[in-house]
Amino acid sequence: MRNPQLNADGGLTHLLTLEGLPADVIRQILDTAIPFTSIAMRDVKKVPLLRGKAVFNLFFENSTRTRTTFEIAAKRLSADVINLNIGASSTSKGETLLDTVDNLVAMNADMFVVRHAQSGAPHLIAAHLNRTGRNHVHVVNAGDGRHAHPTQGLLDLFTIRHYKRDFRNLTVAIVGDVLHSRVARSLIHGLTTVGTPEVRAIGPQTLLPTALQALGVRVFNDMREGLKGCDVIVMLRLQSERMRGALLPSAGEFFKHYGLTPDKLAMAKPDAIVMHPGPMNRGVEIDSAVADGERSVILPQVTFGIAVRMAVLSIVAGN
Amino acid sequence: MTLPDAEQTLAALADRMRGAVAFDARFVGIYSGGAWVAERLAQMIPGEHPVGYIDVSFYRDDFHRKGLKPEVKRTELPFEVDGATIVLVDDVLYTGRSVRAAINELFDYGRPERIELAVLVDRGGRELPVEATYAGARLAVARELSVVLSRGADGRLLLSTEAVGAEQAAESPGA
């Protein structure tokens, strides 16, 4: 079966996951994002590429940063953006996801940016559109359940490449609540595909999925040990809202062992960068001295995220 | 068909521009061939001519048919566009669509005082009301051929023709 994200020519037509996405497609997205970074510095912060296209933000799960950056990205491409407040809409009246999609396609939607608590929802929509011959409508996954958050993974790759030039010889550590993190999953697939020699996951055993080794990831339970020699440290948000049962004694206990403090950061390479997908829990997974410190690239990540999402929207719209 | 020598054509273009171009005109090359020509002209023509570069990919009128080309370069205009005299530089003037896109992009940086157009080769076949202010050579070329500028390792420019194929049409439409 063909990769449902790619068209017959191998071009990216939906972005659902970084898993199985060819390295040259990932590189094309990262390369295309570079010229988009300068648009924010111009008089007119817009290019006419998606003029007249209707982009629907379908957020079935709350998000401020991702929805806003997708909206900015689409607007800087001159698209019309329609934000649907799903909580207060037909879904709560019992309409199925695909019926909602069909209605929006009947309103001439050109693209859906989808966030959903259920893993696979964007895939379901894309497969439905492909099956019903509506290949001109594109789907971009903005985070689905615990599965994937491909644009976050791509903006993380873009940030790493920006500061470290390329992925060869890099050691990247992903720290904290890997179990609940679609960000971690997307980043691991992306890093592996572009040839990063060493990817590490650091966290308590209860917050690390069991299959990490199968993805080629080195697992550490001792954070100081795991940070030794790292070039890049990606801190994850502790997703307390997704936790059921006793995975952790307390947030304070977590910070003591897995919070990134200046003294733990000293274990990594002197020029290591610190990333975080946001929103940050200061004093839970990251100390303020690190979050606001000179090694932190957390705010540049947000800025790069707009350019990367512009690249994704314009590439899928053209295929 | 025989094409003129690119270096001689460049010299002819520079001759036409000397004395006619504003002393402080900014030269903006359209990627990729136009960028090479702009760099050479800036050295050949007296005056202060800072060089900028435009990639018109985000302004093309055939995006919905052809999508985005794989390697988009970064537009770099290292000077104030507002109030400037700008000479757009391209290698081959054909349909005029790239020039239209480049003019649109320039205006998103500011309001230039004046925009002129310098091209190495004008091959006719316009689809838009665009004309070159300065041209190195004017040729009639069959629709089946595209005129391509390349740059050797020694920096010398070379003109050649290629059959218009599907791949090429995607690479340099409206050149």
Image: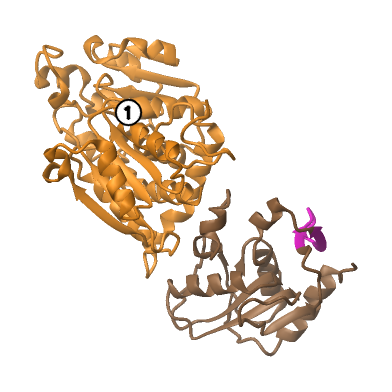
Chain colours: A orange, B brown
Q: Is residue A205 left or right of residue A85?
A: right
Q: Is residue A269 visible?
A: no
Residue B132 image position (x, y, % from top left): 67, 82
Q: Is residue A283 visible?
A: yes
Q: Kindly identify the residue that appears in the image at 37 percent across and 32 percent down.
A: A123
Q: Is residue A109 left or right of residue B131?
A: left
Q: Kindly identify the residue that appears in the image at 43 percent across and 16 percent down.
A: A215
The stretch drawn in magenta includes residue A154: no
Residue B35 image position (x, y, % from top left): 64, 65
- Secondary structure under tag 1 reads loop
Residue B34 image position (x, y, % from top left): 66, 67
**Region rendered in magenta:** B148-162
Q: Is residue A316 above or below residue A195?
A: below
Residue A206 image position (x, y, % from top left): 22, 11
Given the image, on which type of amino acid does mark 1 rest? Gly
Q: Which residue is mark 1?
A: A120
Q: Which quadrant holds residue A241?
A: top left
Q: Is residue B51 left or right of residue A69?
A: right
How many numbered marks, from 0 up?
A: 1
Label 1, residues with CA under 10 Å away: few <14, some 14-19, many ≥20: some
